[in-house]
Amino acid sequence: MDRRTAVLAVAATVVLVGFGSGAILAPMIGGEPDDSAATTAPPNTETLALSPGQAPIGARSAMAVSNRAGVRSRPSPGSEASAVPRGARSIAASSAPPAIETALEWAAPLSRSRAPADRGRITPILLHPRQPPAAPVPKIAIVIDDLGHNRAAAERAIALDRAVTLAFLPDAEAAAALAAEARAAGHEVLLHMPMEPIAGAADPGPNALRVGLVPAEVRRRLGWALSRVPGAIGLNNHMGSKFTADGAGMALVLVEAKERGLLFLDSRTTADSVGFSAAARIGLRRAARDVFLDNEVSTEAVAAQLAETERIATAQGSAIAIGHPHPATLAVLESWLPGLANRGFLATPITAVATADDPLLAESHQP
């Protein structure tokens, strides 16, 4: 085999075996070359010794690596180095084409790391172990609203995991103080903005947003409410089954929210709400409720609704549940939240599941 043929064969072996599956097969036989092989290579070069007529593939390839400093030790009789026949041809990496020289330089450290007893064996070395991508953890955002009028209930809600988002009514006397306490405990805080319900429903409270108000009055009432809950990162609707279905009124509220850098959580007190879709059209950061926890106020009913929340989060990657500061709701949450991570879910504040994409894109949170 002439020099050119040997070089090409070595290159093919390194490339095909080394890169074919992400692992390096470094089969080597023997150790240091004998004097006749070493003297043909300049100092400080890597050399590959081939027996005459021997194909440089598989376990029949023999690689001898020179010392970086060019220092040679004569192999002793019977040593592994003597396994290389005298007169074997020596190919100097410095005289090989650049691609071959690079391959030899890259492969040589692997031969040095092999113990004498391992030489002659085919050893796969995985350079880049492939790790499967981690599955995303489903997120669950719990929001407790209607807070403020009952201080004891509000403080019990504040004592929950800080991932729970708390929404305060602006007309509550202690709203500002409780909101500040909630923020200090690490909770995200929302303004629970009163909005007009359908005819015959309960009174939403003072300064509620109502259909037909002039734009200036809508902005004034919203500004007053926000001043009562300082530090709020957004708002959700209190009642509002009539107002959230009114496109003109909601447009005024959402534009004002965007100018103030807030988000909007649609409580979806009606299937006719335009809140989420209107927010999407203007690129406002937004979210929408998936589950009401306590339309039926009992520990069994709340637990069942939390199980439904977990099911939705598993199916779509996240879920938002809204509850109220009823003793039964708070009691179930106090026992449910600590084990959430063990069940494979992540409790998150509302900002972690809110979306803000370009206007006019398709909605990602349809009822």
Image (spheres, rainbow, N blue to C red):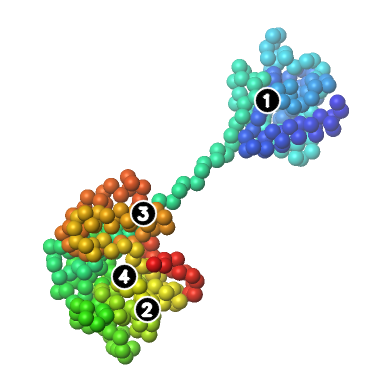
The x, y position of residue 169, in whole percent, is: 21, 73
* Residue 295: x %, y % from top left: 23, 64
CA separation in Å, label 2 and label 3: 31 Å
Cα distance, mark 2 to mark 4? 14 Å
Q: Secondary structure at mark 4?
A: loop
Amino acid type, residue under disc 1 in the picture:
Pro
Q: Nearer the viewer, mark 2 or mark 3?
A: 3
The residue tagged 2 is 254
What kind of residue is marked 3? Arg
Q: Quadrant of the C terminus?
A: bottom left
Q: Which residue is mark 3?
A: 311
Mark nearer the N terminus (2 vs 4): 2
Mark 2 touching mark 3, by CB under 8 A?
Answer: no
As measured in the structure, the alpha-carbon distance from the residue carrying label 2 to the one carrying label 1 is 69 Å
Q: Residues within 10 Å of mark 2 (few under 14, many from 20)?
A: many
Say what amino acid the circle numbered 4 marks: Ser
User: Residue at label 4?
Assistant: 267
